[in-house]
Every structure is written in structure tokens, then in C-alpha cells.
Amino acid sequence: MSTYKLFTVAGTSTHNGVSKARFANDLTSRVKILTKVGHTDIVLVTLPHPMTKLEAVNHLLANLDTGVDQMALSNKAASVEDRPAPKAKTAKATKKVAVKTKSTRKTAVVEPVLEEVAG
């Protein structure tokens, strides 16, 4: 992954007794999907601007009045911080090959034709 993904929605949900942090870019469809597969205690918040997972978690932890699960966010923050930064991709060496061709075509004059079409 060469860049960090940005999200506009973040929060928590509980599934089978386990609360986890959730991230999305569309609030409505994410809530529908989580509800469909049996999640409960779904609390998703629209972020003030697109953020990375770590920025979103820190924003939600700073604003706990949203009702999100603090433990789930703390666990996610720890797992995101432990990840190494993505490596920069190095340019691959390209091999130049000389190609010999025989050209018997004559060069056509295009300018007068273009002037006639444009005029």
C-alpha cells in the first residue's frame, strides 16, 4: 500500500460480544451492512474531514461524547500505531532495445489538408 486510505465515517459496533472500530466512506450503506450481518450497538460518526484510521481514532477518543466504545478504539489505535509506514516504491530498471525497421513509406504533408478541413 503506497498511501494511507482516508475515511469520512468512523465508530464502533459489537458483533458476537466483541466490539471493534469501524471505518467507512458512506454512513448509510455501512450501517445497513452491519445491521444485516447482526451487529449491535452501532455507533458511527461522520468525521469533520477525511482522515486516516489513526487520525479518526484519535478524533473519536478526544470526543467521547459520541457514545463510541473507548476500549475498541484504544485497541485499534494500538494496532494502527504498531504498523510500519508504507515503503516507497522504487522505480524498476527498464531495458531499452534497439529495433531495426525498414520504412518504405514517404512522409505525407498534412498541414494543407488540415487547413482545408478547418476552413
Image (cartoon, rainbow, N blue to C red):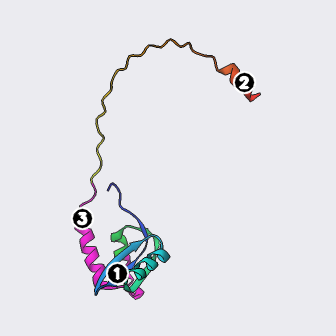
User: Can you give x and y, in whole percent of width and height, for residue 104 in the image?
Assistant: 50, 11
Amino acid type, callout 1: Leu
Quarter occupied by the N terminus: bottom left
Q: Which residue is mark 3?
A: 83
Magenta highlight: main SS: helix
Q: Are marks 3 and 2 in contact (CB under 8 Å)?
A: no
Mark 3 belongs to which amino acid?
Arg
Q: Is 71 left or right of 35, judged from the image as shown? A: left
At 39% from the left edge and 83% from the top edge, which residue is drawn? 63
Task: Judge whether 81 appears above or below 32 on screen.
Answer: above
Q: Amino acid at mark 2?
A: Glu
Residue 57 pos. (x, y %): 34, 75
Residue 61 among those drawn in magenta: yes
- Residue depicted at x 70% and y 19%: 112
Considering every residue shown, the one lying at the far right of the view is: 119
Numbered disc 2: secondary structure = helix
Answer few, some or many: residues within 10 Å of disc 1's Cα (few below 14, many 20 plus, some between 14 and 19).
Answer: some
Q: What x and y, as percent, mark residue 70? A: 31, 84
Viewer-side residue, 83 vs 34: 34
Q: CA distance from mark 3 to mark 2?
A: 61 Å
Q: Is residue 55 above or below residue 39?
A: above
Q: Closer to the N terminus: mark 1 or mark 3?
A: 1
- C-alpha distance separating marks 1 and 2: 67 Å
Provide the residue span drawn in magenta: 59-86
**From the viewer's perspective, is residue 28 above or below residue 91?**
below
Residue 61's label in the rendered image is 1
Q: Reading the chain from its start, which is encountered first: label 3 or label 2?
A: 3
Q: Badge 2 is on which residue? A: 115
What residue is drawn where x is 64% and y is 20%?
110
Q: Mark 1 or mark 2: name the one nearer the start of the chain.
A: 1
* Gap in angstroms between the C-alphas marked 1 and 3: 19 Å
